[in-house]
Amino acid sequence: MNEAIQKIKNRFYSLFSNDIGIDLGTANTLVYLKNYGIVINEPSVVAVNQKTGQVVAIGSDAKQMLGRTPAHVIAVRPLVDGVISNFEVTEEMLAYFLNKVRKLSAKTIRPRVIIGVPSGITNVETRAVRDATKNAGAREVHIIEEPIAAAIGISLPIKDPVGSMVIDIGGGTTDIAVISLGGIVRAKNLRIAGDRFNDDIISYIRNEFKILIGERTAESVKIAIGSVLESKDSIEAPVRGRDLVTGLPREVIITDADIREALSGSIQLLVNATKEVLETTPPEVLSDVMARGVVLVGGGAQISGLPELLRESLKIPVHVADDPLTAVVRGTGVVLGNLSDYRDVLLVHEDAFPPTT
């Protein structure tokens, strides 16, 4: 009887309510709408008027304001290191994105949402994500760990008795996870990712060239000439900032070798953490990983030379997934399409966390 009632409810909700998957990232938020695909890919940035407390802009519009706002307007990232640092602003941002999705579809009842979180975050942090999503307008919220979602999104056989390894290098965190039989066997979460790389570049240019640059400039340079392995041809890019000696604007030319030097410390920590996860992985699962290799996802996977460096350091195959930036949100989309099949990979309650090294 209960099953029949549940089927009727599910059919009703499928007619009048959206199913939405969200990759709530430190740098970017991606939203998947069932039957539509990825409909939003915008920066996780909110501009707030400090005088009135009102939100001025969200997403792409707000990112354009980073470092360019008047004194009473601040452009903030409500997530830091993969977790919510400003609950109210995160709630406003999620509500904004959910409203954008609602305009694409005529369905009126509050949506069912699957949202990704980094592996190993605390109970309090998980509850904050769930509460913010519900307060933003979700009817039902399911939590999935981002490495699991990424593995599903790139079609790894996570439910089979075979080991797979995913490294998700995002904006705030890097998730290193070994997955088998629908769960995480070993995992490590690092606060070393895209934002840390930007900070490394800012520090290096300040120390070596005595020029102060902003976060957006650092990110542009990282994308343009970022590399972690030496190449035959040197690549250059102009960088403009404030001369720390004169206080006046100045332009310098930096090369891929400068970026390589700037990132070397953080990249080495990433390599060491990956080795630690492999060292504690059970032998049978490790054998599978050695045969199948490691898959890189997330924006950081696109740094030139990183797969080759990891391959050289770990002595196992390393691949970059197709469209690595959208792996997590595509995974939430797959789960939405087969929720009954994937229910066991969701975090059912706050205590359902994987073992960490």
Image (cartoon, rainbow, N blue to C red):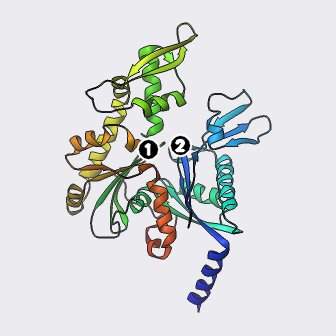
Q: Position of residue 230 (x, y in %)?
A: 27, 29
Q: Amino acid at mark 2?
A: Ala
Q: Quadrant of residue 196?
A: top left
**What residue is pinned by disc 1?**
299
Relative to the observer, which residue lies in front, 44 or 81?
A: 44
Relative to the observer, which residue lies in front, 160 or 281?
A: 160
Q: Position of residue 227 (x, y in %)?
A: 34, 32
Residue 207 in the figure: left or right of residue 31: left
> Can you tell which mark lies on residue 336?
none
Tag count: 2
Label 1 neighbourhood size at 10 Å, few (<14), some (14-19), many (20+)?
Answer: many
Contact between marks 2 and 1 (CB within 8 A): the answer is: yes
Which residue is depicted at the point 65% across and 71% down? 17
Q: Quadrant of the N terminus?
A: bottom right
Label 2 neighbourhood size at 10 Å, few (<14), some (14-19), many (20+)?
Answer: many
Q: Position of residue 86 (x, y in %)?
A: 63, 45
Most extreme residue toward the top is 246
Sequence-first disc among 2 and 1:
2
Which residue is depicted at the point 47% across and 66% down? 334
Which residue is depicted at the point 68% across and 52% down? 96
Q: Quadrant of residue 224?
A: top left
The answer to whether any part of residue 120 appears in the image is no
Q: Amino acid at mark 1?
A: Gly
Classify mark 2: helix, strand or loop: loop
Q: Position of residue 7 (x, y in %)?
A: 58, 84
> Can you tell which mark lies on residue 27?
2
Q: Look at discs 2 and 1 and give the one toward the viewer.
A: 1
Q: Quadrant of residue 5?
A: bottom right
The answer to whether any part of residue 284 appears in the image is yes
